[in-house]
Image: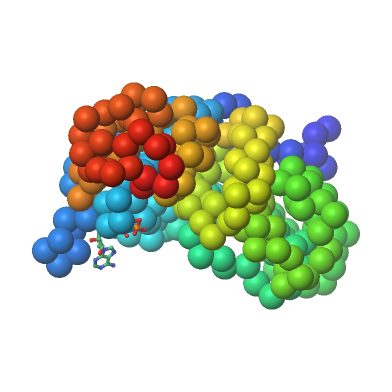
Amino acid sequence: MNARERGGPAASHHPGPPPPLRIREVTVRFAGLTALDGVSLTVAPGTVHALIGPNGAGKSTCFNVLSGLCRPDAGQVLLGGTDLTRLAPHRIAALGLARTFQNLVTTGTTVADNLMLGRHALSRAGYAATALRLPSALREERAHRERARELAELVGLGPHFDAPVAHLSYGDRKRVELARALCLEPRVLLLDEPVAGMNTAERARTADVVRRVREALGLSVLLVEHDMALVMRLADEVTVLDFGRPLAHGTPEEVRRHPEVLRAYLGAEGTGEDAA
Ligand SMILES: Nc1ncnc2c1ncn2[C@@H]1O[C@H](COP(=O)(O)OP(=O)(O)OP(=O)(O)O)[C@@H](O)[C@H]1O
């Protein structure tokens, strides 16, 4: 009997390798401004794909389309064979696409409480069973808490599991966000500027954590990040957006040498640092 048959959550909500995430010809317009103009990209299973570009290039809009916060005017988002384009955010999350946000959105309680919010979406016990604290609901709660603790340990938050979030460093609070997204057992993780506001040591630590998470959980990652050194270290593939259009695509090395990218980032060429 596995954990799921016993009434608890399985170690991973979605067994097997992640399906490819395909963005096909997506266009988004805001009152005359075209934020995304026929953008296509594929996040291959198990890879880290970085989406970079200058301010206003359309990166956040792309994440908002992927996570269901913004409906595209045209185009499609597919996770394997499933069309996510018109689904509500909670449905998209349940199908295996979880995201973090640029700004911290942790609540004022403990790390454990924040992570259990993520597990809540996977909970199978009904409201009444939970409120009455029936044995089946308590068992499920315990199993979810165990998994939340495992994921906290994976991102280096194990010793802080029962600590109030307010007592943590900025870097640790960003990792609470990451662990909460992992609590949804995603197949594809969308990371929106995971090292923004961090110092050099915290940036390096977060890069290690992302690598470890990808390897341990076998998921794919789509990363928006301005720190080009981090992008170059972490990404298998890079897509560059400029004014809502795809400007270049390739390995970090190919993109770094791409003449159009050098033109868009004039002044930053060759340094590989903070060019986005
Ligand atoms: N809700 C909105 N209403 C109107 N215009 C918007 C809206 N959201 C984004 N835009 C515009 O769409 C364009 C793309 O913005 P977006 O935030 O996606 O860029 P970005 O690449 O994420 O930029 P940054 O790196 O600064 O976060 C910009 O010109 C922006 O002003």
Which quadrant of the view contains residue 269? top left
Residue that appears at 60% across and 55% down:
199
Horizontal and vertical percent position of residue 263:
21, 39
Residue sitting farthest toward the bottom: 108
44 sits left or right of 203 in the view: left
Image quadrant of ligand 1 equals bottom left
Q: Nearer the viewer, residue 211 or 216?
A: 211
Q: Is residue 55 visible?
A: yes
Please give left or right for residue 170 compared with residue 237 in the image. right
Residue 107: x and y in percent read: 65, 72
Q: Nearer the viewer, residue 143 or 208?
A: 208
Q: How is the image coloured?
A: rainbow
Q: Is residue 161 above or below residue 44?
A: below
Q: Is residue 166 above or below residue 18?
A: below
Where residue 128 sits, quadrant-wise, is: bottom right
Residue for point 71% across, 46% down: 155
Q: Is residue 160 above or below residue 217?
A: below
Tell whether 75 sits left or right of 23: left
> Which residue sits at x=20%, y=34%?
260
